Amino acid sequence: MILTVTLNPSLDKWYPINEFEKGKAFMAKDVIYTPGGSGLNVAKVIKSFNEPVMAAGFSGGRNGEYIEEMLDNRGIDYSFISINEETRNFIAIISADESRTEISEIGPSISGEEVVEFYELYKDIIGTAEIICISGNLPRGLPSDTYRNLIIMAKEQNKKVFFDANGEALRYGIEASPFLVKQNRGELEELMGFLMASEEDIERSARYIMENGVELVIVSLGSAGSMFFYDGYSYNVKVPNIKAINAAGSGDAMLAGFAVSLLRDYDFEYQLKVAAACGTANAMEIEAGKVDMANMKMIMNQIEIEKKKMY
């Protein structure tokens, strides 16, 4: 079983409006409501592979109840701590030119009692998981070292942890040496404090992360593909050109594809192809955290991998 952790989930509302402009009124003919937040996106893609998955985190108010109803409808198991405040909304307007306008609420403030409840829950359920995916931003009320604590608790039970965050939460989490760290180019630049002008810059940054005991680093590069760093080698993964609709959640889909591939013990380069194909297929959908398996397999057949010794 794969466990995903989403400490600041959201009720996502996607509005496809082709000619959206500031200051005008529009009628949204189609609205897509989905469970959101990075960890829930990961869980949705894992479920599309028919692999057992459980989502853990916080849930509050009517939004929280609605998210739980949608997860029930999708057959995704979950274990949430009920909180006093309302789970946040996330609104995105998707235009015909592939641009995206987002409004993301800051989300609820988590009380000390609710934090303690979650730690107790997490300690009980990590024993049932083989892989734990911890991703997304932290809600208010949780200290920046929260993810580090969760990673340490999982490693004490010899679990593989996939980690995807940013800012101070990322810095603290890396210190706990998760098995895998995933970043996009912008997040990596924020972490390192300089622009990634070349593949050598990206590799240098990956080496810095791996010096903390991280075994595998993934850097997603959008339409340019991705780079994987593992066991002294870099893998430059090139994906085919596709008609992108919404790239949101593509990194989460990539993480899900890799988790499933590792759980199934696929050959390593095959794991890379599954992960990259999931990320690319997600960009072909309006909904974040959605992968059409036919698209994913089509993309897999066109992926090219260049393997090189790390400097």
Image (cartoon, rainbow, N blue to C red):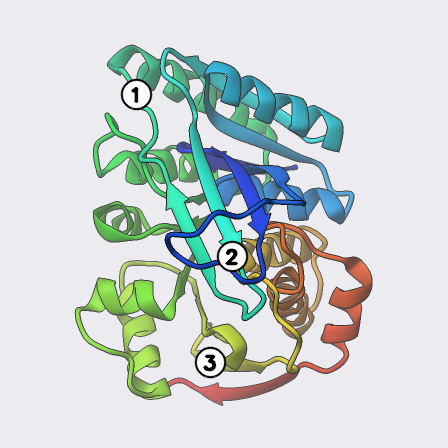
> Which x, y percent locates residue 286?
63, 55
Q: Quadrant of residue 180?
A: bottom left
Q: Is residue 101 above or below residue 284?
A: above
Give the amino acid at mark 3: Tyr
Residue depicted at x 61% and y 37%: 33
Residue depicted at x 66% and y 22%: 69
Q: Nearer the viewer, residue 297 or 212?
A: 297
Mark 1 or mark 2, which has the lower sequence index?
A: 1
What residue does disc 1 label?
110
Q: Quadrant of residue 250?
A: bottom right
Q: CA distance from mark 1 to mark 2?
A: 26 Å
Mark 3 or mark 1, which has the lower sequence index?
A: 1
Q: Which mark is residue 233?
A: 3
What residue does disc 2 label?
248
Give the amino acid at mark 1: Ile
SS type, badge 2: loop
